Image (spheres, grey):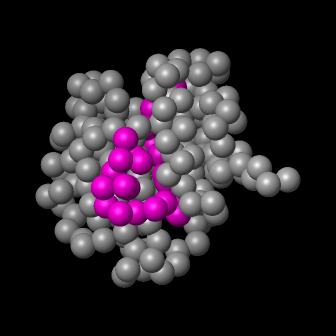
């Protein structure tokens, strides 16, 4: 799926955050932080045209699963038509329902969750629901990766880091400049409350 399709969906769907797919450098920056082991469950919020989806499938073991949650019908149709892999399931729905989707499939938790959805454009209550359910959906050692525009579309006060800190523990934050637009990448985990 090319940039023209992204542009059409960007102007036609407020939940589409970018006019172009994430660059190879941006994808590599995230995937290099992941350890791919047998039997993993990976969830992707907002796969769009599938640049992360395709890269994940190349790295995943044969017995791992990838659940891609996408609201935009055009992206769902494109991904469904383009990708045929028994490890991949594409769900048309909302990231806030991640717990339901996992429970329906008998999955206890996700090892990794990746998100490219435009958190800065969402109402506060929706951000809270998504992040709360993401925390609940992760395994104790799981990681949540969020990649967002370096500069928030709706101003710094809406940067996802503020909300992330309310629900999860940020492990690291990095910038990827070789992307249009440049990205801020957050890695977070379930807070350790044992101490």
Which residue corresponds to the image point at 40% horizontal and 32% vertical from the top-left?
Answer: 17
List x then y, in percent, for residue 162. Answer: 67, 29
The residue sitting at 22% across, 54% down in the picture is: 79
Q: Reply yes or no: does residue 58 show up in magenta.
A: no
For the point 42% across and 56% down, the residue is 43
Q: State yes or no: residue 105 in magenta.
A: yes
Q: How many marks?
A: 0
Q: Nearer the viewer, residue 2 or 9?
A: 9
Asked where in the image residue 73 lies, by quadrant, the reply is top left
33 versus 184 height, above or below: below
| Spot occupied by residue 136 in the image (x, y as percentages of width and height) | 54, 48
Q: Tell which of 113 and 59 is nearer to you.
A: 113
Residue 34, percent across and down?
58, 66
Work out whether 21 lies above or below 50: above
Q: Is residue 157 left or right of residue 63?
A: right
Residue 68, given in percent of the width and then of the height, sits at 33, 54
Question: What residue is at 62 percent from the left and 30 percent from the top?
Answer: 163
Relative to 42, is 69 on the left or the right? left
State which region is magenta.
97-120
């Amino acid at each position: 799926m090319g940039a023209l399709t992204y542009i059409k969906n960007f102007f036609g769907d407020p939940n589409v955050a970018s006019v172009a797919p994430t660059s190879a450098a941006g994808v590599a920056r995230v995937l290099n932080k992941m350890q791919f082991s047998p039997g993993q469950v990976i969830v992707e919020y907002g796969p769009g045209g599938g640049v992360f989806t395709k890269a994940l499938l190349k790295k995943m073991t044969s017995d791992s699963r990838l659940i891609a949650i996408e609201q935009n019908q055009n992206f769902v149709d494109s991904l469904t038509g383009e990708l045929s892999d028994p490890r991949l399931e594409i769900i048309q729905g909302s990231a806030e329902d991640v717990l339901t989707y996992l429970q329906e499939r008998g999955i206890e938790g996700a090892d990794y969750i990746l998100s490219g959805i435009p958190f800065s454009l969402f109402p506060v209550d929706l951000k809270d629901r998504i992040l709360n359910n993401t925390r609940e959906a992760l395994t104790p050692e799981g990681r949540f990766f969020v990649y967002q525009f370096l500069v928030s579309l709706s101003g710094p006060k809406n940067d996802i880091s503020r909300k992330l800190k309310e629900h999860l523990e940020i492990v690291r934050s990095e910038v990827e400049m070789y992307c249009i637009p440049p990205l801020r990448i957050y890695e977070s985990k379930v807070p350790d409350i044992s101490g």
